Image (cartoon, helix red, strand yellow):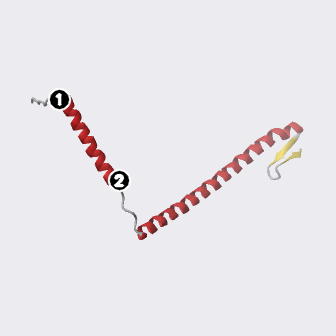
Amino acid sequence: MNLKTANLSKSYSHKIALLALLTFGTSISLSSHAAPLTISQQQAVNAHFSKLAQAQYAAETQMTEQLKQDFSQQLTAQEHEFMNDICPKYGMTFDVTTNACLRS
């Protein structure tokens, strides 16, 4: 199959490209102008944003509580590890229930 393309002059192809760009740009800019919202539509949007804010607050609160819990667990583990290392240096044992070094 032989396909032949038409030879266009450079200036003509540039003009077509410019016209296509202008047409495309105009169609985008004309469709980007939205009509103002009606009162009921604005109320629906406000209700939606309120629900989003509540959901975000709940998620942030849950994440904060989880981080606090994780931090407390890590801190307790590190304290116990430290005390298990320190108490024997002084001839004592670490008691987990009282979190203190006890004489053996």
Q: In front here: 38 or 84?
A: 38
Disc 1, SS: loop
Q: Residue at x 24, y 37 (%)?
A: 17
Is 96 situated above or below 16? below
Residue 83's spot in the image, x, y percent? Answer: 81, 42
Residue 29's spot in the image, x, y percent? Answer: 33, 50
Question: Which quarter of the rendered picture does the C terminus lie within?
Answer: top right
Label 1: few (<14), some (14–19) or many (≥20) C-alpha neighbours in 10 Å? few
The residue tagged 2 is 32
Disc 2, SS: loop
Is 60 situated above or below 86? below
Residue extending furthest bottom?
A: 40
What label does residue 17 carry, if any?
A: none
Residue 101's spot in the image, x, y percent? Answer: 86, 45
Residue 68's spot in the image, x, y percent? Answer: 67, 52
Q: Residue at x 16, y 30 (%)?
A: 8
Residue extending furthest left?
A: 1
Q: Which is more foreground, mark 2 or mark 1?
A: 1
What amino acid type is highlighted by mark number 1? Ser
Question: Which quarter of the rendered picture does the N terminus lie within?
Answer: top left
What amino acid type is highlighted by mark number 2? Ser
Q: Is residue 102 left or right of residue 34?
A: right
Label 2: few (<14), some (14–19) or many (≥20) C-alpha neighbours in 10 Å? few
Is 47 situated above or below 17? below
Q: In front here: 79 or 24?
A: 24
Q: Residue at x 66, y 50 (%)?
A: 70
Estimate the spatial distance between the alpha carbons at disc 2 and disc 1, rounded to whole Å.
Answer: 35 Å
What label does residue 9 carry, if any?
A: 1
| Residue 54 falls in image quadrant | bottom right
Q: Residue at x 80, y 38 (%)?
A: 85
Tell me which label, 2 or 1, sits earlier in the chain. 1
